[in-house]
Amino acid sequence: MGRQRIFSGVQPTGNLHLGNYLGAIRNWVEIQSQFDNFFCVVDLHAITVPHKPETLAQDTYAIAALYLACGIDLEYSTIFIQSHVSAHSELTWLLNCITPLNWLEDMIQFKEKALKQGENVGVGLLDYPVLMASDILLYQTDKVPVGEDQKQHLELTRDIVNRFNHFFAKPDQRVLKLPEPMIRQEGARVMSLTDGTKKMSKSDPSEMSRINLLDPPDEIAKKIKRCKTDPIRGLEFDNPERPESNNLLTLHMLLSGKTKEEVATECQEMGWGQFKPLLTDTVIEALKPIQDKYQAVMNDKSYLESVLRHGKHKAEAIANQTLTQVKAAMGYSMPL
């Protein structure tokens, strides 16, 4: 038996922040040697909401470089760009035709984002979960590292697999594999610096709400200095009435490598004036190696292009094989 396969991806919309890193990418790095990994820059997903065409390609390459900078190892992992593998779009159409409309209309993220966009909401936003399902299923994925906010989409993916195999697969031979979620517990939901009850997000209009992986030290210091706190002296975890305390302590714990008990003891008598400089130093020190490696990768364009070219060819071979199996099961003639 070979290693189980993992698939995951990040949109190239804005800079990656600590929530992306601690909730997803760092987990990928820690477990990658145990799996056969496919990490994608999901640029097709990026246009489900209004985007900037002039920066899409640049942002896409930047995310790929950050994958490498954060520690994705090409010995264990494949990095590629979603739109470079046309099977993603083709499988999405095929799965669209067997996915009930009401399944998509029930997606919480669609309801929330559609409310913001009003009458201008595009079909792509409704169809986002089917594209996500295609991303996963093309690679016969065993496990999908997801945040809590994507868990509903993965459940829909599993529903699509069961529906497809019921209609088109032989009883003793499945066509699509049923993927399992892999949810990190600690750090799975890094919260906003301006509101400890809301998730840190690229879509938040305030830059002060998040620390980006490429923020310079002075920007990090400014954001932490101005982040929301409470008037209570002494910091503590897990008090529902002190969400900012729990969030900022968790950031310090995850980035310093200390245990929860060590951080709780270290900070239990601290005021915010003592803790914020400590957290600032911890964040800056943790992000420096990532920022240095990112600059090195971006300065070597030929290397990055070779990584993505190799990733495309490897991903395409597997994706096209799955797509052929799906089309055959649905009754399509094969190309002559």
Image (spheres, rainbow, N blue to C red):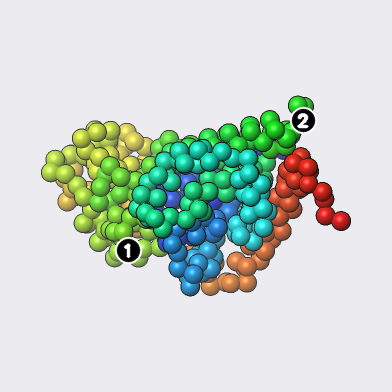
Horizontal and vertical percent for residue 178? 63, 34
Location of residue 264 by image quarter: top left
The quarter of the picture where the C terminus appears is bottom right
The quarter of the picture where the N terminus appears is top right
Number of numbered discs on residues: 2
Residue 7 visible from this viewpoint: no
- Tell me: 271 left or right of 18: left
> Which of the pair 13/279 is nearer the observer?
13
Label 2, secondary structure: give it: loop
- Tell me: 195 left or right of 159: left
What amino acid type is highlighted by mark number 1?
Answer: Pro
Image vertical order of residue 194 relative to residue 60, above or below: above
Horizontal and vertical percent for residue 260? 34, 36
Q: What residue does disc 2 label? A: 170
Q: Which mark is residue 217?
A: 1
Label 1, secondary structure: give it: helix
Q: Earlier in the sequence, mark 1 or mark 2?
A: 2
* Residue drawn at 30 percent across, 45 percent down: 198
What amino acid type is highlighted by mark number 2?
Answer: Lys
* Residue drawn at 22 percent across, 57 percent down: 225
* Residue drawn at 50 percent across, 60 percent down: 47
Front tag of 1 and 2:
2
What distance separates the C-alpha of mark 1 from that of mark 2?
A: 58 Å
Horizontal and vertical percent for residue 54? 48, 73
Image vertical order of residue 69 relative to residue 140, above or below: below
> Which of the pair 123/24 is nearer the observer?
123
Image vertical order of residue 167 relative to residue 192, above or below: above
